[in-house]
Each structure stands twice: as C-alpha cells, then as structure tokens.
Image (cartoon, rainbow, N blue to C red):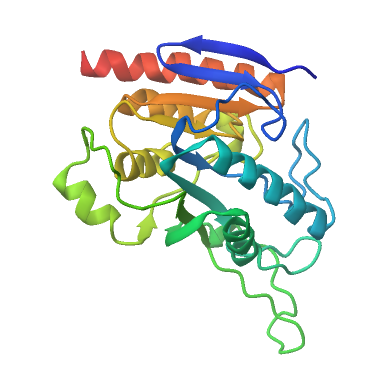
Amino acid sequence: MTGTIYFQDSGMTIINDDFVTTGLVEDNSVDLTVTSPPYNVGKDYDSHADAMPYQDYLDFSRRWLAKCLRVTKSSGRLCLNIALDKNKGGQQSIYSDLVSVAKQVGWKYHTTIVWNEGNISRRTAWGSWMSASAPYVIAPVEMIAVFYKEYWPRATKGQSDITREEFIEWTNGLWTFGGENAKRVGHPAPFPVELPRRCIKLFSFVGDTVLDPFLGSGTTLVACAQTNRLGIGVEVASEYCELARRRISSEAALCRSSTA
C-alpha cells in the first residue's frame, strides 16, 4: 500500500499508511508523541495481527519506537500508554518490556504515570477461585511511560495553557478517570480524550506538533484540536482513518463553537 494524506485541515493531518514504513512524517519534526500501540492481546483490528508471538511483538515495538525517535525533535517527548501486563496468550510483563525496548533504541526514560482506569468490575478471570493453586492478580490500571529524545528541558520555550490546578493535579503520577466505551466510538481499543489532553497540556506548548503513530479512532487528534496543537495521525486501516476524520470534524467543531 502506498501511503496517502487521507485528511488535512486546520492543522490536523491523517495519514493512511503503516507508520514504520511511511515517508510522510518528516524526520526531526515532532515535539510530542502520544500513543497507545496495540497490546497484542487479540483485539479485533482490521489491519493488524494482535496475537503475534511475543518476541515478534517486541520486534515490532522496536521498529516503531526507533522510527518514532527518528521523526522526533531533539527536545521532543514520548508518552506511551501501555498495559501493565497481559495474561492472554501467557503472562507477560508488557510495560517493563516495552520500557526496556524504548531505552534500547535510544529513548531516555523520564517517569511513569499510573492511570487508574478502575475497570476491575468488568473482570471475569479469577484463576483458581479461592485457592492458592493458580490465582490471577489483575491490576485495574494502565501505564503512561514518559520518555525524551536528547534532553528533558525544552531549549525553546513557548506558551503553556495548563492551569495552576491542572498542573498540581497532573504532576501527581496517579491519574484517575474512566476509560472509553468501544461501542460508542466504533473502535475495539479506544482511549478517552482525557488521556492525550492531559499529556498534551502537561508536556507540550501551544502550537507544537503532536504525533500519534497508531491513530485508531482519532482521539489524540481530537485532543490536539481542542488544545490548539498541530496533529499528525498515522493509521494503516482506511476505515479508521474515516472514523478519525469524522470525530475530528465533529468534536473539534463542537470545541470551537463552545469557545467562540
């Protein structure tokens, strides 16, 4: 498939392509990446095998993390939303493994935010019920690992739009808010707008370029439109590109009308 610009308007760009191989994102052009890559837990994506052997998944992660580093500016950052661990297809420490891979390809580690999604009520897998034979321990949280490319302080300052209250609350590394409803959005694994909105306002300036290499339903670009950042989203499935285009157009328009 040859990559194309699927949509471009008002500072938002959707690229229909495989992020690892696309040539449509310029090197050293991105200030902040906010993304939630496939977790390899068997989600029903249209154009991605989400149940590959674990080593293949780590190799895939290494490729996209290296490409992400290449397109990031020297003072750029990465917010990586990933599960703490996974139990489908065997227990794996997915968060710590991806942190290790990111550091191996050149990302420098800064911190980790724990997102308390609070979805423990939906769990059905207990392992050996009320027995020490083989119980499953499942934490109702996800992780947001924060990295930077070369140095943490931004050499060039810009306009921050974060409020005093937001700064105090969000620099506490435990964030508590609900997840997103997959049926409402129309995508098997969406994250809520609140997640990229917080990352964008905390770790970037107004007018910065924000990338999501796994755009999915377009949530990161919706947050970009709502916070006056330039947004680039790469998505391999054309049907999700269209879903993202519709969400950006409708939700960004709602945001503009509410602030007019």
Q: From the viewer's perspective, is 161 left or right of 221?
A: left
Q: Quadrant of the C terminus?
A: top left
As drawn, the residue found furthest toward the bottom would be 132
Write the residue at 71% across / 79% down: 129
Q: Nearer the viewer, residue 92 or 21?
A: 21
As drawn, the residue found furthest toward the right would be 53
* Above-or-below relation of 209 to 37: above
Residue 68 screen position, x and y as percent: 58, 40
Q: How many marks?
A: 0
- Tell me if I can see residue 192 in this picture: no
- Tell me if I can see residue 44 in this picture: yes
* Above-or-below relation of 87 to 175: below
Write the residue at 37% across / 56% down: 175
Q: In terms of image quadrants, where is residue 223?
A: top left
Residue 63 screen position, x and y as percent: 70, 45
Write the residue at 31% across / 39% down: 201
Q: Quadrant of the N terminus?
A: top right
* Above-or-below relation of 175 to 229: below
Q: Nearer the viewer, residue 155 or 22?
A: 155
Q: From the viewer's perspective, is 260 left or right of 130?
A: left
